[in-house]
Amino acid sequence: MRYFAKGFFLGLSLVLVNKICCYLFAEFSETAIAIFSGIVFFAVTTAFLISKHIPGLLACGFCGFFVMFFGEIAVIEMNSHYPLYHFLVVYIGGFFGSMAAIPTAIILTIRKKSQKEVFPMTQPYPNRLKGMLLLYALISAVGFSYLVMPQNSGLGVLIFGLLQFICLWFIVPSKKQLILFFPILIFCLNAFISANTIWRAPNLILSAFLYAGMFTKFHWQCDSISDIRNVLVYVAKSVANIPLPGKWLLQMSDKNAPIIKRILLGLLLAIPCALLLTVVLANADMVFSAKTGQFFESVFTLFHARTIFILIAGIIVGLYLFGVLAQAYQPGISAQTESRVRHGDFIIISILLGMILTVYTLFVIVQFRYLFARGALPDGLSYTEYARKGFFELFFLTGINLFIILCVVRLTRHASGKKGICIKLFCHYLCAVTVVLLISSFYRMWLYTNDDGLTRLRFFVMGFLAFELIGLLATFFYIAKPKFNITLIYLTIALSYYTILNIVPTDYLIAKNQIDRYSKHERDDVNYVFTLSADAAPAMVYLAEQTTDEGVREMVEHVLKERSSSNIPNRWQRYNLSIQKAKKLINENEAVAK
């Protein structure tokens, strides 16, 4: 019954959270509303779902879902002017946040069941360390609010990253752990050198996990997926350390704790009485009413919804980063590897792989005969139509093949003799076939690009295929000697690719490709270029100089002014190299025109 009551309050809390998010985030973009709402829903849902056992967690979750669902229906029916648009955007982000909260809560519940305390704290922190951690939390909170939270912050984000690195250099237990901070610095650099905002939200989320990864012990010499789980557990532990500053302050003044409680109780009683008295006196005297009205208006102007949000965001980030470092100094934080050994049936695996490889062999023969060698196609099928079709299907199959290889190696790693050799040959052959599929996918995407030019999606996919090839090469070695953690190798390759995307001028390269094809009359228009960020400004200026179409010139001028100007007041935190370069190009063109 207790868990149903807990679920009831979870549902009511989510209804209330929706109202708060609709109010606080009303002035933000759809993406920002969804992201920040997801973070809030994740925190609230995780806090409620953590239980002593899984059945209690499920009872709480289902009850909370139904209460929230019917509660929102009741609110909408009672208020015909309910802002449905913000409601839907908030709950889209809230849905994904709640989905992420479920596995997090399950992990914490399992750990809670196996331990007396979810987050044991067996040793006290020295006073000097407490002071350093609290100072770090304060610097992080203020720095995030002042440097990162201003809209379109550029230089401010880079300075915040450098400030974090300097602080961590003096606080972390071991400076070797800071190696994972370099991708975070590159993410911060992206906000300064690029006007492309598509990486901002993913960079923030990934940085939160990289902070936790800096203090998680990875096992490179044994294959285990538990390292991913350990990072998630470390994130959850860091969140659980958030109340520590309050506990430390109370411990520092145990004798004064009763006095503090009495002061807080007095304020709790006095503030409502003062507000009620103010309302009564305001109704009794018009001048007093006008003065108090002006006072409250000035207070509400000072504490604008966005200002409140910026302060809350800074406090949350500061406390989270404090929790990460506080957890690093707790004993017993080393990751645990999976000790369970799994064995697969040799006959079943051999039959499955044999059938799969037979089909793939026929497909590879067709690829070499018709796609790569450009043989005569049947039924009058054109080569372009044949080659362009099937990219996404092959791309999907490369991932499926990698998954099959990893599962087979994991199930048969202890097989010896002829059985082990046979399985390894099968896996090596499947890996080679996957390379052929990868080359075929890349070739088809290259034909797409030759036909219609580069787009962001095509650029990202072609880069991903190149890094996937590196992953396949690592897989070849892993099949032969599965003595290293291939999961961490894949994650390292993926992180390297994502980090490179943050410093590559993607929009400029795409715009240059599109404009070159337009200049060679291989494209009818360059409308896609006008959807890109200010990073593409040099290519757009080149387009305006080369084209004879006056409409295209006017469109370039309009887009450049739009990308380089903003209704937001200028602040030094928003300084961005790409936008400044676009402004300089506009001024040079205007000077030439005069």
Image: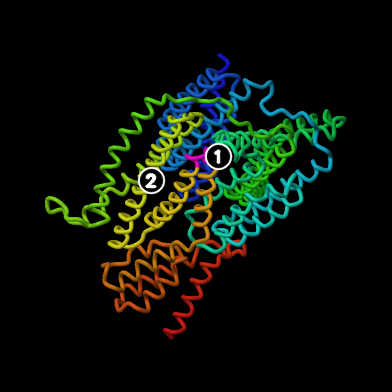
**Farthest residue, direction top:** 1
The image's mark for residue 485 is: 1
Q: Is residue 90 visible?
A: yes
Quadrant of the image containing the C terminus:
bottom left
Left or right: 480, with 358 as reference point: right
Indicate the amino acid at tag 2: Ala
**Farthest residue, direction front:** 417
Q: Position of residue 509 (x, y in %)?
A: 42, 65
Image point (34%, 47%), residue name: 437
Colour option used: rainbow
The residue to which callout 2 is attached is: 432
Image point (80%, 29%), residue name: 262
Q: Is residue 289 visible?
A: no
Q: Which residues are magenta?
A: 478-487
Can you tell which of label 1 and label 2 is closer to the viewer?
2
- How far apart are the two marked residues, 1 and 2, measured between alpha carbons? 21 Å
